[in-house]
Image (tube, grey):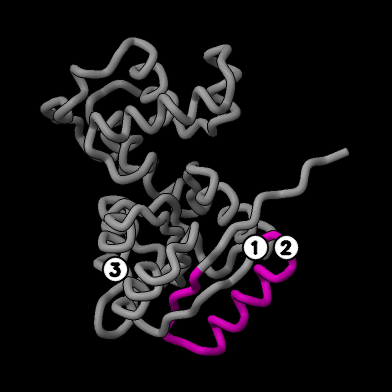
Amino acid sequence: MREPQPIVRVVVADDHAAVRAGIAAVLAADPSIVVVGEAADGRAAVQQATALRPDVVLMDVRMPRLDGIAATAEVVALGVAVLVLTTYDVDEHVDGALAAGASGYLLKTAEPDAIIAGVRRVAAGEGVLAPEVTMRVLERMRSTPQEAVAPPAGIDELTAREREVLVGLGEGLSNAQLADRLGISEPTVKTHVSRVLAKLGAPSRMRAAVLARDAGLV
């Protein structure tokens, strides 16, 4: 008998009421995902995250008062995960969102199942990127000349096991895939990931993955 899925509490931030209603309807297909709040701009998104402490904030990029990227940085600082859900897949927005600590970046053209799965993965402490975004990031990495980059602060503090975990993050592995590769349990993987993020000062595993690539570990 399958164990019930844990409840995931979500705040939806988008400046269009019809879009917020549509996203809420998509998430309602999974009875274990509950929309606990909505926000029509970035400042309201931060306020909702502060007051409600959801598991995930679904964040649009272009919003009034405070844009989604700036709002992401403030929400992540509260210890709340952010999944960007937007129309825009331009490099500036992708890089800005990941640097701000977003755990994922999906496009509004994604299938409902992909959005639901993305929310669940981010709530579980994992990361997710839209396939279109992943290809753009990889293409830019291939086309950008490699320059010497100073190792991120804290990387020398990582244990051998934590370095293995960081390499896996850089390769985009999930917790389950890391557990299988390293021969350890998923809870142990989560513990190692948390320690890696703390030592690197990285707000999310997506940011840690970027640091791993910048350091030449992947």
In space, the residues marked 1 and 2 are separated at their CA atoms by 6 Å
- Front-most of residues 21 and 149: 21
In space, the residues marked 1 and 3 are separated at their CA atoms by 22 Å
* Residue in the picture at 31% in, 42% down: 207
Q: Tell me residue 146's x, y (percent).
A: 20, 30
> What's the amino acid at mark 1?
Ile
Q: Which mark is residue 71?
A: 3
Nearer the observer, disc 1 or disc 3? Answer: 1
> What's the amino acid at mark 3?
Ala
| The quarter of the displayed image where residue 171 is located | top left
Q: Tell me residue 95's x, y (percent).
A: 29, 54
27 in the magenta segment: yes
Read off the magenta span: 11-33
User: In the shown orientation, is residue 55 left or right of residue 34?
Assistant: left
* Residue in the picture at 47% in, 87% down: 16
> Which residue was labeled with disc 2?
30
> Which residue was labeled with disc 1?
33
Q: Which numbered disc flags the more N-terminal residue, 1 or 3? A: 1
56 in the magenta segment: no
* Residue in the picture at 74% in, 64% down: 31
* Residue in the picture at 31% in, 34% down: 197
Question: Cβ–Cβ below 8 Å for labels 3 and 2?
Answer: no
Question: Cβ–Cβ below 8 Å for labels 1 and 2?
Answer: yes
- Against 209, is 113 above or below? below
Tag 2: Cα neighbours inside 10 Å, few (<14), some, or many (≥20)? some
Q: Which element is circle 2 on? A: loop
Question: Looking at this rendering, what residue extends furthest in the bottom direction?
Answer: 17
User: In the shown orientation, is residue 84 left or right of residue 214?
Assistant: right
In space, the residues marked 3 and 2 are separated at their CA atoms by 26 Å
- Against 106, is 174 above or below? above
Tag 3: Cα neighbours inside 10 Å, few (<14), some, or many (≥20)? many
- Front-most of residues 102 and 50: 50
